[in-house]
Amino acid sequence: MNELTITAKEFFTKYRSTFDKGNMKEFSTFFNEPFMSVRADGKIQSLSCNKDAELFFPLVIDMWKKEGYNSFTMSDFEVVKLGSTSMLVTFTWEMLDNNADLIRQWRQSYNLVKNYDEWKVILSTFHR
């Protein structure tokens, strides 16, 4: 496994763990300002600052909890270096319930940029 893939996996392991803990203040810091997401239904969610992300993602958690969400796992990482300070990371999210049974899964891609030695998500795209 190359260094960039290790970096991406470490980033998204922390990203997933922070989300699963429900710490939206910390979770919002994973995103660039501004940040954009192309949702599964094709709608675009644009968040101009981290405070917007901090307010948006609890709504996502509430929606997913209605489906039985308890935690996530990740698999099938693909990492493409786009330049010295950018990469494209695609992987499969697996949404799990309290028994660690699969509720659903999907592929998602993230464009990351490096700002002052920190990787930030600038764009995410859900794939059907």
Image (tube, grey):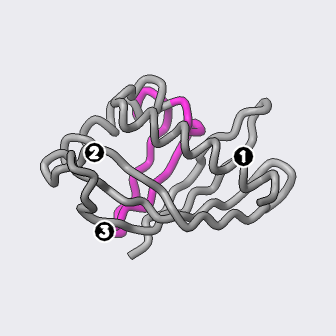
The N terminus: image quadrant? bottom right
Q: Nearer the viewer, mark 3 or mark 1?
A: 1
Residue at 21%, 50% in the rendered image: 99
Residue at 57%, 36% in the rendered image: 33
Q: Verify CB contact (< 8 Å) between mark 1 and mark 2.
A: no
Where residue 76 sits, quadrant-wise, is bottom right
Residue for badge 3: 41
Residue at 25%, 58% in the rendered image: 101
At label 1, the amino acid type is Thr
Residue at 35%, 66% in the rendered image: 105
Marks 3 and 1, how far apart at CA: 30 Å
43 shown above or below 49:
below
Residue for badge 1: 7
Q: Earlier in the sequence, mark 3 or mark 2?
A: 3
At label 3, the amino acid type is Asp
Q: Residues within 10 Å of mark 2 (few under 14, many from 20)?
A: few
On the image, the x and y values in percent for residue 52 come to 40, 33
14 shown above or below 78:
above
Query: Is residue 37 part of the magenta span, yes or no?
Result: yes
Residue for badge 2: 60
